[in-house]
Amino acid sequence: MPDGAGFAFAQGILAVTGEKIYFLPPGTKPHSMNIAFVRIQPTGTTKTTSMLKRTFFITAPVAALLLLASCSGGDHAKTDEMMAHNKAMMAADSLTKAQEATTKALYDLINTTSSDGIEKPVTDDFVARLMMDTSIKSTGIQALKDEMAMYFTAFPDFHQDIMGMATNGDRTYVVLHITGTNKGPWGSTMPATGKAIDVMGADVVRFVDGKVAEHWGYMEEMKMMGQLGLWPPAPAAAPKSMKK
C-alpha cells in the first residue's frame, strides 16, 4: 500500500504513513477517538507485528494534526511546519486567555471599591494615559490608587460590568457598562449631587510580563455630566447694565 494512502474503514478514516496503518475502530464516540494502528512487516508479509489502541479527547488542533498526518504522504517538512504553526497558535491562545483573565481580575477588584491587592495585576510603573482628574500629581501605580480613591469617595457604589473583551497582541480591549450614585464630592471641585450615572465606556490595557502596564480609558462623559445635572452649565448672569 503506498505511503500516504487513505480510504474509508469501518466508521472512520484509515491513514497509511510508512509502515503504520492508523484507523478509527467502530464505536468511536463524538468528541473522542479510539486510535489504533498496526505495523506492517516488509513487503510480501501479511502478518502484523504490533497493534496499539488508545483513547484521546479530540480538540481542533489535534484533529488538524491527524488530518495532516493522513494527507502528508510522509512529507516531514510540511508536518513540521504545521506543528510549528499549531504550537504558535496554541501559545497565542494561551497568552490571550491569560491577559483576559488578568483583566477580569482587575475589574473585579475595582468593583470591591478598594485598591487593596492592586499590585498583583498592575505593574509598579503603570501609566494612565487619560487621568480623569488633573489634581492627581502622583505617578505609577500610586496614581491609579489615588484616582480609584477619588472615584470611590464620589461614587461609593461604583461598578463596571464587562460587556465584551478582545485581545490583539499585548493589548486587551474592554467594553464597559458603568453605574454608580454620586453620594460624595469629586475632589474639591464637584459637590455630591445625589444622582445616579448609567453610561458606557471602553478601556484599552497594555500588558508587560503578564501585568497591566498602560491604560487608555473612554466613557460617555457628557452623558454622565448631564445625568448628574452638571451639563449643560447654568447660563451666566447677565451684566447689570443689561438688566431692566
Image (spheres, rainbow, N blue to C red):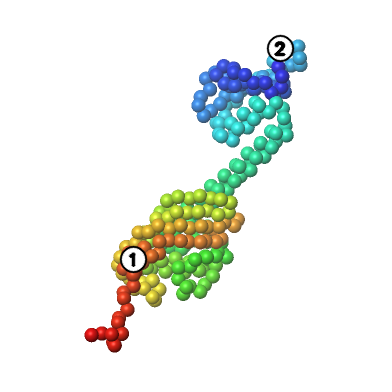
Q: Is residue 51 left or right of residue 231?
A: right
| Mark 1 closeness class: few <14, some 14–19, many ≥20 residues within 10 Å | few
Above or below 150: residue 169: above
Q: Nearer the viewer, mark 1 or mark 2?
A: 1
Residue at 45%, 50% (x, y): give it: 164
| Mark 2 closeness class: few <14, some 14–19, many ≥20 residues within 10 Å | few
Marks 1 and 2, how far apart in space?
A: 84 Å
Q: Amino acid at mark 2?
A: Thr
Say which element carries label 2: loop
The quarter of the picture where residue 3 lies is: top right
Q: Is residue 57 left or right of residue 41?
A: left
The image's mark for residue 127 is: none
Task: Point out residue 228 in the picture as x, y percentages from the top left corner.
Answer: 33, 67
Q: How many marks?
A: 2
Above or below 219: residue 89: above
Task: Point out residue 241 in the picture as x, y percentages from the top left corner.
Answer: 29, 88
Residue at 41%, 66% (x, y): give it: 151
Residue at 66%, 27% (x, y): give it: 71
Task: Point out residue 24 in the picture as x, y percentages from the top left corner.
Answer: 58, 21
Above or below 190: residue 62: above
Q: Is residue 175 left or right of residue 77?
A: left
Query: Residue lying farthest bottom?
Result: 241
Say which element carries label 1: helix
Query: Who is closer to the viewer here, 216 or 115?
Result: 216
Task: Point out residue 153 in the picture as x, y percentages from the top left corner.
Answer: 38, 68
Report which residue position mark 1 lands on. Answer: 226
Report which residue position mark 2 lands on. Answer: 46
Residue 146 makes an appearance in the image:
yes
The quarter of the picture where residue 53 lies is: top right
Query: Who is closer to the viewer here, 95 or 166?
Result: 166
Query: Who is closer to the viewer here, 106 or 136?
Result: 136
